[in-house]
């Protein structure tokens, strides 16, 4: 039986596809409209944030957030923005593209995340302006202490939460620790809109700029009262308001197909998180009782919500053993996200090779992950737990 990393395009796949066909058979608007707004509203409420801005991918969410921080003057080009070295490429890439100075921070082996201790060690004596932390694969380290420290030092904290939608740490969902956070609804992630991503924040000015940055730098997707404010401020009349461009933007809008699916899938999100958490507990018990692997520390997290299970082997030989084992059962495995991002060619070509040994490199060279689907059968879970046994 083959077990792919991504089992289905949607939770309740066939039912959702039927609903989608039905939706498409009506002559409704398909460009951004009421379903996208409905999804934004539902997601903001679910996340416990004031605002949610829906875009066409998690990568675009990162891009517009970093652009909006420049547009609103919260950060400047050249500013040192530190980021987790175990992350996805489009976390540091927009930092590079937008002219920030990106600097990687190493992670802890047990949690795969940046801790306050690793953060403080790295930034000593540096002129840091912001931390763009990645909450890796449903985990975090002591992000509450990091948030407190950032606040006390006037360091802007933003979270890439594309891998941890639904994780709860110290009574708070990840994605609610910083000024803003990003999410992905790509099919392989927690909840699917085929492609998609969101930025969440409680900050009204940032929200306004994010909406404009998402589409051309215009105000047309903002609520009417905010449009009135902006048009009055700049003296823009009704005719030119159609094509008035206020801030540096892109076009990374989602469409109503994404919005319709997202709004519909929201009814399942808590269930998806609960099942994934239950699966995780069964898998982690196996990982942590197998001496071939480094244990995963998760007891400090109330609810772990991930879409893949990371396994870090104690040697390269052990990794080879499990690669063969998983392949023989046709179970798809991949490196742990992008691994250490500074090991990738785009980074080395820009900044050269890092001249020190890091934990992220160890995870990169000795780690793998397999999927955590909310729709696994008992047989599939038995195969996976069996593969993790010594
Ligand atoms: C940490 C992180 N950030 C951003 C992204 C990008 O999301 P998307 O694939 O929706 O562009 C990913 C994708 O897997 C990710 O893992």
Image (cartoon, rainbow, N blue to C red):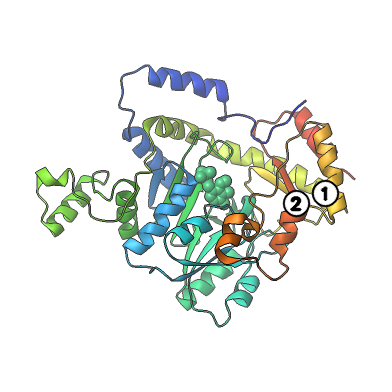
Residue 45, position as x, y percentages in the image: 42, 46
Q: Is residue 144 left or right of residue 379?
A: left
Q: Secondary structure at mark 2?
A: strand
- Residue underneath mark 2: 367
Q: Residues within 10 Å of mark 1 (few under 14, many from 20)?
A: many
Residue 184 visible to the viewer: no
Residue 216, position as x, y percentages in the image: 29, 47
Q: Quadrant of residue 307?
A: top right
Q: Secondary structure at mark 1?
A: helix
Residue 199 visible to the viewer: yes
**Distance of mark 2 from mark 1, alpha carbons?**
7 Å
Q: Residues within 10 Å of mark 2 (few under 14, many from 20)?
A: many
Front one among 283 and 335: 335
Most extreme residue toward the right, as rendered? Answer: 390
Compared to residue 35, the image places residue 294 above or below, namely below
Residue name at image x 15 percent, y 59 percent: 233
Most extreme residue toward the front, as rendered? Answer: 349
- Residue underneath mark 1: 319
Residue 111, position as x, y percentages in the image: 69, 59
Front one among 64 and 99: 99
Quadrant, the N terminus: top right
Residue 304, position as x, y percentages in the image: 64, 49
Front one among 353 and 237: 353
Compared to residue 206, the image places residue 35 above or below, namely above
Contact flag, marks 2 and 1 (Cβ < 8 Å): yes
């Amino acid at each position: 039986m083959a077990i792919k990393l991504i089992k289905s395009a949607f939770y309740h796949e066939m039912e959702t596809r039927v609903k989608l066909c039905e939706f498409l058979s009506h002559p409704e608007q398909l460009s951004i409209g009421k379903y996208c707004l409905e999804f934004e509203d539902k997601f903001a409420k679910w996340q416990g944030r004031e605002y949610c801005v829906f875009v066409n991918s998690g990568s675009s969410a990162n891009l517009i957030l970093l652009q909006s921080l420049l547009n609103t003057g919260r950060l400047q080009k050249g500013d040192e923005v530190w980021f987790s070295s175990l992350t996805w490429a489009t976390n540091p890439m927009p930092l590079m593209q937008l002219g920030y100075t990106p600097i990687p921070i190493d992670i802890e082996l047990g949690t795969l995340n940046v801790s306050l201790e690793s953060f403080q060690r790295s930034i000593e004596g540096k002129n840091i302006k912001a931390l763009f932390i990645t909450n890796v694969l449903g985990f975090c380290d002591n992000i509450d202490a990091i948030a407190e420290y950032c606040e006390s030092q006037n360091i802007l904290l933003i979270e890439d939460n594309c891998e941890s939608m639904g994780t709860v740490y110290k009574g708070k969902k990840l994605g609610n620790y910083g000024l803003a956070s990003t999410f992905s609804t790509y099919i392989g992630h927690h909840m699917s809109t085929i492609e998609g991503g969101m930025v969440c924040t409680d900050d009204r000015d940032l929200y306004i700029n994010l909406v404009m940055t998402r589409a051309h730098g215009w105000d047309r997707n903002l609520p009417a009262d905010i449009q009135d404010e902006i048009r009055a401020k700049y003296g823009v009349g009704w005719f030119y308001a159609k094509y008035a461009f206020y801030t540096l933007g892109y076009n990374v809008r989602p469409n109503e197909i994404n919005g319709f699916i997202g709004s519909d899938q929201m009814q399942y999100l808590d269930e998806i998180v609960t099942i994934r958490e239950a699966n995780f507990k069964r898998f982690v018990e196996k990982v942590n009782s197998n001496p071939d692997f480094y244990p995963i520390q998760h007891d400090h997290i109330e609810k772990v919500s991930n879409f893949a299970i990371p396994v870090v082997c104690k040697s390269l030989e052990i990794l080879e053993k499990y690669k063969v084992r998983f392949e023989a059962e046709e179970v798809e495995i991949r490196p742990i996200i992008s691994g250490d991002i500074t090991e990738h060619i785009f980074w080395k070509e820009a900044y050269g090779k890092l001249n020190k040994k890091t934990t992220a490199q160890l995870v990169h060279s000795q780690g793998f992950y397999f999927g955590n689907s909310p729709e696994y059968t008992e047989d599939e879970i038995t195969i996976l737990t069996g593969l993790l046994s010594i």
